[in-house]
Image (spheres, rainbow, N blue to C red):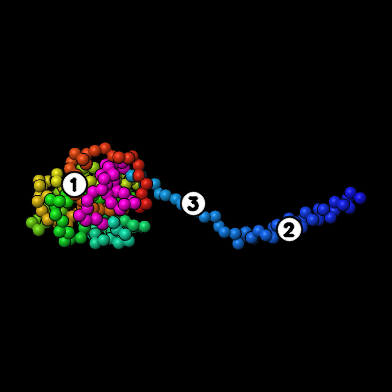
Amino acid sequence: MNSMKSTPFLAGVAAALLLSACDQPAPWARAAAAPQPSQAVRNERAQAVAWNEGAGRFELRGAPLRTGRIWTFDGATDGFVLAGGEVLPSTPAGLEVRNLGPDAALRSPKGLALDGGRYSLVLVRLTRTRAGAEWDGDLFYSTQAHGETGGFRAKPADGGDPAPGETVVLVYDMANLKAGGDDWIASLIDQIRLDTDDASGGAFVVHQVAVTENPGAAALAQSPLRTARIADR
């Protein structure tokens, strides 16, 4: 008797479970779980001058640096050329620089017509992507009065000789040249040239290049505001 009563009850439970299963979409029809957003953490050297990705500008300890010219290489080489190697647009942005010969020279477009007296800070943010030998870091420039020579050049006051995978801002104080005295600040600048490595084999991604107003050597020597950065490119 008890067995006969339980049979309809079990059948009802089974039917309810079957109907419940029918209400659920088939596995292939269910929405896929949304992927979690990811951020690439770049090995960025802590420096007083840093790139603010959100604002699209260079800053000194959080204060913006007024810019005379800036290149961000958004899917293009922006007119930069490399003697002794090759340059290509990087992904998602930036300039891929491959040094195929010794003393490769990366040059900006000509005709910059930059007032060196007003804009005397050159900033190059880059990541070394392949080890090289004999880091150089010289920055040359040309004017109507002279071309590129060893008599007019600068070395980075900060940010030199990045390790593989490291991102730095090369900070060139053109008011305090390695050679050339006050020539930059007394000139109209036509073109700039960056030499990364003296030897072949190294590679970089150049993210941004800018020529900005110069807050002075004392301000540039300040300690960085923060010790790590997350960049999108």
Give me the disc on residue 36.
Answer: 3
Amino acid found under the numbered disc labelled 3:
Gln
Amino acid type for the residue under numbered disc 2: Leu
Label 1 or label 3, whichever comes before in sequence order: 3
Where does the image place residue 81, in percent across and percent down from the top left? 23, 60
- Which badge, 3 or 2, is on the more N-terminal residue? 2
Between the residue at mark 1 and the residue at mark 2, the CA separation in whole angstroms equals 75 Å
**Residue at image point 88% right, 50% down:** 3
Q: Number of marks in the image?
A: 3
Q: Badge 2 is on which residue?
A: 18
Magenta segment: 45-71
Crowdedness of circle 3 by 10 Å Cα count: few (<14), some, many (20+)?
few
Question: Considering only order in the chain, which callout, 2 or 1, is on the residue closer to the N terminus?
Answer: 2
Where residue 14 sits: x, y (%)? 77, 55
Q: Secondary structure at mark 2?
A: helix
The residue pinned by badge 1 equals: 214
Q: How far across and down, in percent of the image, does residue 156 sit?
A: 21, 45
